[in-house]
Image (cartoon, coloured by chain):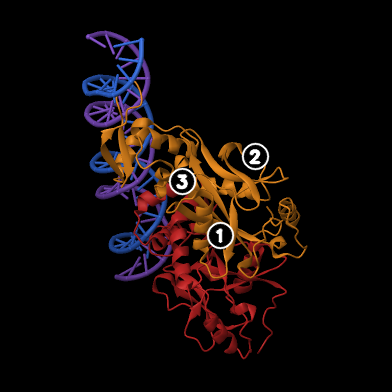
Chain colours: A orange, B red, C blue, D purple
Amino acid sequence: MAQPLPGIKEYLPHLAYDLVIFGFNGKQLKILLLEYQNTDYKALPGGFIRREEDLDAAVKRGLKERTGLDHIFLEQFYTFGNLQRSRPDIMKKIIEANGISISGNHWMLDRFMSIAYYALINFDEVNPQPDALSKSINWYTIDDLPTLMMDHKEIAIKALEVLKLNLDKKLIGMNLLPQKFTMKALQTVYETILGEKLRRTTFQRKMLGKDILVRHEKLFTGGAHKAPFLYSFK
Amino acid sequence: MAQPLPGIKEYLPHLAYDLVIFGFNGKQLKILLLEYQNTDYKALPGGFIRREEDLDAAVKRGLKERTGLDHIFLEQFYTFGNLQRSRPDIMKKIIEANGISISGNHWMLDRFMSIAYYALINFDEVNPQPDALSKSINWYTIDDLPTLMMDHKEIAIKALEVLKLNLDKKLIGMNLLPQKFTMKALQTVYETILGEKLRRTTFQRKMLGKDILVRHEKLFTGGAHKAPFLYSFK
DNA sequence: CTATTATTGTCTCAATATGTTACAATAATA
DNA sequence: TATTATTGTAACATATTGAGACAATAATAG
């Protein structure tokens, strides 16, 4: 199992990125978290930046490695740079739990700044993959998170705040749904992210008024009632 | 004149910050730019982060060095990490123009990520100071900027975009004014940042309705007409 | 000292946007 | 074929914002 650690010649020191990958299962907003060997702490997926690689490219690469998906909504939202956020003791424990020995002055135990991004993906399309040091990766409900490593909970909470702020302004909610979706599904996404109920008629009027949705001819038949239209993002 | 360059033992490699310091002279929105010896390029003030210093603390230190001011509105808005943004040739020229010799593999000529912040200050209170490598520092109108070094124009433009977005949401416009100001002055700040005229009566009603302003008894007498009230930020 | 001028603070009414209720349409089920 | 639950949209009520009007008044001119 033991693989060589990433080399300092290949990556920039002191710099990492972390990913808050949001998915929506129809009822709850969830994020992907890694589980490490021999630690109870869960962690955000993340990685390092190659010396000859654009920052955005590094993050896209990491997102693809974890989700298998390309062309996903992805946005940088903050860079975390406190001294206290770096915890070489925890890093060492995680690495050694994978049967890898690491010297005390290894670059991965240095102080790190983390440039945080959030991504929005269609929950049903993804088959998440753990990274080299973690035993598994799973979805966790955003408003009932387990204990996270280091400052990762702070990062996740901030991602949700930014998502709330941008939801309407940038019209990004639909990135969490399949390509075709009902108005009700879209409303549920909004309600879940914002944490409040919205009025059906007002929501529908607002969304249709924005001229960003295409209504499709085929209806969606899912219950003992009038079938709703399906929409897609223009 | 020639001073020793900052040492790699003291600072984190590959990491810098840049500052977009906004000021308002009553008519135009301006930012502070440094001028280097022997280069036509102007540059944003910036600096490095000490190995044992919080990111925010480093930026506050830099802001104080340039402006002499503490307790200023300051907010991180983006981290720039393209490969192409780093230009060792330009850095070398600037350093050597100060009579300092630098070896080709010096850490200051490496690739850099820049964590960008913007600050809002009262134009009249500040006496800007150039940094060790620059000959002067001056105010430049944001919508008529000279040619800037590397990606600094992109950084400045993005700062203005973020400022526009946050202006109303975070009610930060008053940070550009003296402690006491007229409603008209506040409106002019908004109009200048947003780049559009606002209706006087609507603006006044909106601002007073937000319950963030304190009206003072003393009036401001500045012309042949009814004197406006002075307000301060609650 | 008084009339003029320009700007301010606030009021009113109009226009627009949003909240709320109502109701016909209809796919699945009984 | 009737019932049920949900949808799409219209209609009306309420709230917010736009736009004009006007009295108040500090400085200036005469």
Q: Residue D19: x, y in percent?
A: 26, 50
Q: Is B134 drawn above or below residue C7 in the view shown?
A: below
Chain letter of the residue carrying label 1: B
The amino acid type, in three-letter code, at marker 1 is Glu
Residue at which label 3 appears: A121
Q: Secondary structure at mark 1?
A: strand
Camera-side residue of B199 and B162: B162
Alpha-carbon span between mark 3 and mark 2: 21 Å
Q: Is residue A45 visible?
A: yes
Q: Is B172 drawn above or below residue B16 in the view shown?
A: above
- Tag shown at residue A146: 2
The amino acid type, in three-letter code, at marker 2 is Pro
Whether labels 2 and 1 belong to a single chain: the reply is no
Camera-side residue of A23 and B101: A23
Q: Is residue B217 visible?
A: no
Q: Residue at x 50, y 68 (%)?
A: B82
Residue at which label 1 appears: B75
Camera-side residue of B94 and B127: B94
Chain letter of the residue carrying label 2: A
Alpha-carbon span between mark 2 and mark 1: 30 Å
Q: Residue at x 70, y 65 (%)?
A: A107
Extreme residue in the right direction: A104
Q: Residue at x 48, y 36 (%)?
A: A25
At label 2, counting other C-alpha atoms closer than 10 Å, the crowd grade (few under 14, some 14-19, many 20 or more) is some
Q: Residue A94: x, y in percent?
A: 71, 51
